[in-house]
Amino acid sequence: MTDDLDAATPDGAGGRPPVYATAGLVRALLDIAEDRSPNKVTIAVTTTPAGEFEPPLDLSPETPVFTDLYLPGTGGSVAAVFGMDLGTPASDGRFVSHPDGRLEVRQTDDLHEVVFIGVPPWDDTAIAAFDRRGRGRALELLDVEPPAESLPP
């Protein structure tokens, strides 16, 4: 992978399953990217199994659906005191903004199994999903609310 990759076509080719994400998560990611532009932002994103949604989704119950994000900079005070980044939990993917408009994975991006790239104009047409090698993945947005979470008693 080089920094001058040809733009990968996010078409889900190669028999790979699509990447599912809630429309609300995608809107939140793009809003954060727009607010931080012209600076680049990297955000950890996590999934919820499709079987946990009510009403049930028309997907296999174990299908991962990207639903949540961890705000950048969370845990900064812990890192400052202890010298360790404990604020970024294990995640299932990454969102990376490219304010320059290049809708592709770059060698300098924080890579993950699934990488979402967002670009201006920061709308639903300005985001795509890729694998860590920069190959496009089909992205399907689901207009659903993630399951409510609560803290244990």
Image (cartoon, grey):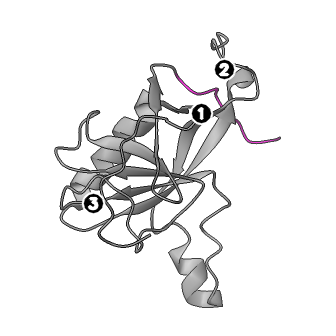
Question: Residue at the spot x=46%, y=27% of the render?
Answer: 140
What residue type is disc 2 on?
A: Phe
Decide whether residue 146 is among the magenta residues. Answer: yes
What is the CA distance from the residue labelled 2 to the residue labelled 1? 26 Å
Q: Residue at x 29, y 54 (%)?
A: 33
Q: Residue furthest right?
A: 153
Residue 91: x and y in percent read: 63, 55
Q: Nearer the viewer, mark 2 or mark 1?
A: 1
106 horizontally vs 78: left or right: left
To which residue does mark 1 refer?
15
Left or right, 79 with respect to 101, comes to: right
The amino acid type, in three-letter code, at marker 1 is: Gly
Q: What kind of residue is marked 3?
A: His
Q: Are marks 2 and 3 in contact (CB under 8 Å)?
A: no
The vertical placement of 133 against 55, above or below, is below
Quadrant of residue 82 within the rendered picture: bottom right
Q: Which residue is mark 3?
A: 98
Tell me the quarter of the image containing the C terminus: top right
User: Which of 59 and 136 lies nearest the eye of the viewer?
Assistant: 136
Above or below, comparing residue 61 to residue 66 in the picture? above
Q: Is residue 144 above or below residue 148?
A: above
Q: Which segment did they paint magenta?
A: 145-153
In the rendered view, would you say 71 is above or below 122?
Answer: below
User: Disc number at residue 53?
Assistant: 2
Label annotation for residue 75: none
Mark 1 / mark 3, whichever is N-terminal: 1
